[in-house]
Image (tube, rainbow, N blue to C red):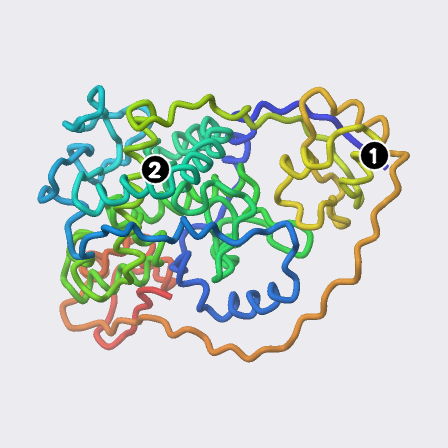
């Protein structure tokens, strides 16, 4: 057996993973993936193979404020009571530019946001909900995110994403690596299996990187950047993260709309999606004004660790017994390991251990017996009807550029999706717009 110790700075680890080549956006939305053929079968398998570490999403994450107004009110234009956003709503808010308009509210000092934030009735309702109805729970979410916030903000900055967008994870899972939804979305960023694999995450019987705080954050940053490139505005990108880009694209096409407000007034998107955007705005307002809302708390200890390369299956319990490292601490550092053991098929799995314990773990590894996993569960055969694709029939006078603008699909994405190299398209041809 071979082992190798590596001391890891958590921020450097995040930047290192950025170099990994991940697949581009392919038109499979996070929410829509639950109905795609591959994931429907995978979800059925997961029912038979659901590891005990996972916990259902906390009900407060999907609960609605009791005083929630009608869902047709604006959340991304100037009709709100107070707007706090970049002057250009499509601005990505990179780390080099945090320009924004301040919120003229009761906050003790002007706050600058780098995503569009509106103080309208829906946002105010969610602020009250977080600050009163579920205050204790929201405080737990803030504390949990504080452990990872420096890492997440650093990764987002590398992708040119606004730092306030980090708060999307608060309303997704309370940044809980073990959270899973009824649709089988998993991890702090609630990726469906298909979308996670598209963005380079390993998901199998032994490892689920949707639960890895570093790798899932990189995947989320890639996905959010792709969504913003597609829709050009953060409210629409947020809505697409919740509902799937195909659904938002179709809603814009049917309404001839250009903003989230245009589709929020219709029945073309679900109530959950209509409230998802103001929910993120409310979480951002509180997260940026913790003292004002009485959430002044010391942050959790930062996510730091050392890594030891392990070339066989070893169970956390055996490592804990041999090294004295608390079992729960190994679980906390390695939430992606579904069976509380390193995988048997990896010649150098990077096991995370507490800072200062790597040498001790290396010294005892050879004395720890290999873990023998129970037999793999059998995969049942299920017939799944494929989800139909949205196709567009080319008309006379159409060009790729016109179709790209009509359906809010980047020209590069449209070409790649249809394997087109020539700019010429013929009337009567079919183009795949979303799938």
Question: Which residue, as the protein is rendered here, is positioned at the far left?
Answer: 79
| CA–CA distance in space, label 1 to label 2 | 41 Å
> Is residue 380 toward the left or the right of residue 394 in the image?
right
Q: Position of residue 415 (x, y in %)?
A: 33, 58
Q: Which mark is residue 73?
A: none
- Location of residue 3 with respect to 204 vertically, above or below: above
The residue lying at 38 percent from left, 53 percent from top is: 62
Tell me what residue is drawn at x 14 percent, y 27 percent.
Answer: 104
Asked which quadrant contains residue 106, the reply is top left
Dividing the picture into quarters, in which one does residue 174 lie? top left
Q: Is residue 230 visible?
A: no
Question: How far from the left and from the top, in percent, is residue 327?
Answer: 73, 36
Residue identifier under label 1: 321
What residue is disc 2 on? 165
Q: Between disc 1 and disc 2, whose residue precedes? A: 2
Whole-percent x and y of residue 386? Answer: 45, 75
Q: Quadrant of residue 431?
A: bottom left
The residue that appears at 17% across and 45% down in the rendered structure is 121
- State the residue in front, 147 or 35: 147
């Amino acid at each position: 057996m071979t082992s190798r110790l590596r001391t890891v700075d958590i921020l450097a680890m995040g930047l290192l993973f950025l170099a990994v080549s991940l697949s581009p956006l392919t038109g499979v939305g996070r929410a829509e993936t639950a109905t795609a053929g591959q994931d429907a079968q995978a979800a059925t398998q997961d029912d038979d193979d659901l590891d005990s570490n996972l916990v259902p999403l906390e009900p407060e994450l999907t609960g609605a404020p009791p005083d929630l107004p009608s869902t047709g009110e604006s959340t991304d234009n100037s009709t709100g009571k107070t707007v706090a956003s970049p002057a250009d709503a499509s601005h990505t808010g990179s780390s080099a530019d945090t320009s924004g308009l301040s919120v003229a509210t009761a906050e003790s000092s002007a706050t600058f946001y780098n995503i569009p934030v509106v103080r309208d009735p829906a946002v105010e309702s969610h602020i009250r909900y977080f600050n009163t109805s579920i205050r204790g729970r929201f405080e737990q979410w803030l504390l949990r995110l504080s452990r990872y916030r420096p890492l997440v903000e650093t990764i987002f900055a590398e992708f040119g994403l606004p730092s306030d967008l980090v708060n999307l994870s608060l309303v997704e899972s309370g940044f809980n690596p073990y959270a899973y939804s009824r649709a089988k979305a998993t991890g702090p960023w609630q990726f469906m299996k298909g979308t996670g694999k598209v963005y380079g995450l390993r998901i199998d019987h032994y490892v689920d990187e949707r639960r890895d705080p570093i790798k899932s954050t990189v995947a989320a940053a890639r996905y959010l950047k792709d969504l913003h490139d597609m829709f050009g505005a953060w409210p629409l990108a947020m809505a697409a993260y919740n509902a799937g880009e195909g659904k938002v694209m179709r809603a814009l096409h049917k309404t001839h709309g250009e903003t989230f407000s245009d589709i929020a007034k219709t029945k073309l998107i679900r109530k959950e999606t209509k409230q998802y955007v103001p929910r993120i705005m409310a979480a951002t307002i509180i997260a940026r004004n913790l003292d004002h809302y009485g959430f002044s708390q010391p942050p959790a200890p930062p996510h730091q660790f050392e890594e030891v390369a392990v070339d066989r299956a070893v169970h956390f319990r055996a490592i804990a017994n041999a090294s004295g490292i608390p079992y729960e601490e190994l679980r906390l550092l390695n939430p992606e390991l579904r069976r509380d053991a390193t995988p048997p098929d990896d010649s150098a799995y990077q096991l995370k251990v507490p800072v200062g314990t790597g040498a001790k773990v290396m010294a005892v590894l050879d004395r720890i017996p290999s873990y023998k996993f129970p037999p793999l569960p059998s995969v049942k055969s299920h017939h799944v009807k494929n989800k139909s694709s949205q196709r567009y029939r080319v008309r006379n006078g159409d060009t790729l550029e016109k179709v790209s603008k009509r359906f809010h699909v980047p020209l590069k994405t449209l070409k790649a999706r249809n394997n087109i190299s020539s700019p010429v398209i013929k009337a009567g041809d079919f183009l795949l717009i979303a799938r």
